[in-house]
Every structure is written in C-alpha cells, then in structure tokens.
Image: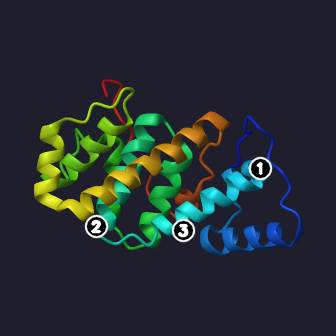
Amino acid sequence: MASKTRIPKAKLTGPYGAMVKWMSRRTFGDVLEPAEVAWHNRKVLNFTFNVGRMASRWDQCDQNLKSFAHMAVASLVGCRFCLDLGYFQAHNEGLDLTKAREVPMWRESRVFTPLEREVMEYAEAMTHTPPTVTDEMSARLLEELGAPALVELTAFIALANLYTRTNTALGVESQGFAKACGLQPLAMASAAT
C-alpha cells in the first residue's frame, strides 16, 4: 500500500541505513516512508528521530489524551499516514481502540469524555492558521490536567503539527499499518467538519 511521494524515497544505505530499516521493521513491521524520504537529508531525519524519542519519554500527560490529540491534528490536516500509524500505535500500546478509531469524527461520536473532547478541541485550535486557542480553553485544561501536563500536551500537539504537515507536504500517504493488523477502518469525518 506504498504511495508515490513528492520527493522520491531514497534507498537506506550503509550501517546507519541498515539500523534504521531494522528498527523500523522491528517497531512497525515495515520501513516508514517518511524515513525513506528524509534519508535525503540525514540531519533532518536525525532531528525527527531524536525529538520523537525524547517526546516518547514525557510522562506528565495521559497517553490516551496525547494519542487522541495527535490523531485530531492528523485528521484536521489530512495526514493519512499519521492517522494510520496513530491507530496502529494505539493498538500496540494498549490504548482505547474504540475511541482511537472515532477521532476523525470526535464531534459526532458519543464515546469521548468531556475532557477528551476538550483536548481534541484544543489540538484543533492549535492547528488552525492562525491558532484559535482561547484563554477559556487553556483555563479549563489547566484546571483539569495541571500545569505540567498542559505544557506537555501543548508541546506534543506542536510536534504533531510538525509531523502531519511535513508528511502531507511530502505526499506521504497511509502505509496500511492498521489494516495489516486487522483493525477496523477509521471512522471518517463528515463533510461539515
């Protein structure tokens, strides 16, 4: 289910390329197309890997909330790769799959708590250009989550924007990770969203 990217995928070569392929296959079952595209500029690839690795160690905000936020950003931006990979990762990390598959239509879905809805609203507000985050939105989340978790969530959403916008601009599409492990298709947002 590989896609044709706007910048051709590069062949991962040498010891570092072998390590990237091995780690990618071990973690995801396949080599990630964004890594193959970014291979053209190893400094960018290394930055992306390093920041992702560091962010994975953040522990002040609930992982489900961060997953829903990332998928809400991906849905709004239209990054099918991030939606597919996010759903697959939710499966592998034991997160709530019923909710994860409903993120693209979170406004219509009845499975989310008020806090989860606020997090996805915040993620979308950060993603709009210009951002539409309000004092009220931030105050509600600060009260619900506390300052350390809100700082983490905000930074995580900013990273989600980096990934989704980069993948979308480079033409990276879904690689079929969710389908490969037998997950139900993601719910699709209505045209009014």
Cα separation, mark 3 vs mark 1, equals 19 Å
| Residue at x 12% of width, y 58% of height | 144
Q: Which residue is mark 1?
A: 41
User: Looking at this rendering, what residue extends furthest in the top direction?
Assistant: 192
Look at the image and tell me whether residue 101 can be seen: no
Picture coordinates of residue 186, whole percent (x, y) = 42, 48
- Foreground tag (3 vs 2): 3
User: As displayed, is residue 51 above or below residue 119?
Assistant: below
Judging from the image, what secondary structure is the residue with disc 1 in?
A: loop
Residue 8 quadrant:
top right
In the rendering, which numbered label is found on residue 124? none
User: As displayed, is residue 164 above or below residue 143?
Assistant: above
| Residue at x 29% of width, y 57% of height | 151
In the rendering, which numbered label is found on residue 53? 3
Label 1 Cα neighbours within 10 Å, binned few <14 / some 14-19 / many ≥20? few
Picture coordinates of residue 99, whole percent (x, y) = 29, 57
Hey, what amino acid is under mark 3? Arg
Picture coordinates of residue 104, whole percent (x, y) = 36, 42
Q: Is residue 55 left or right of residue 27?
A: left
- Foreground tag (2 vs 1): 1
Discs 2, 1 touching: Cβ within 8 Å: no
Q: Earlier in the sequence, mark 2 or mark 1?
A: 1
Label 3 Cα neighbours within 10 Å, binned few <14 / some 14-19 / many ≥20? few
In the rendering, which numbered label is found on residue 62? 2
Hey, what amino acid is under mark 2? Asp
Quick one: 107 or 42, which is closer to the camera? 42
Judging from the image, what secondary structure is the residue with disc 3 in?
A: helix
| Residue at x 63% of width, y 52% of height | 175
Picture coordinates of residue 128, whole percent (x, y) = 36, 30
Cα separation, mark 2 vs mark 1, equals 33 Å
Hey, what amino acid is under mark 1? Asn
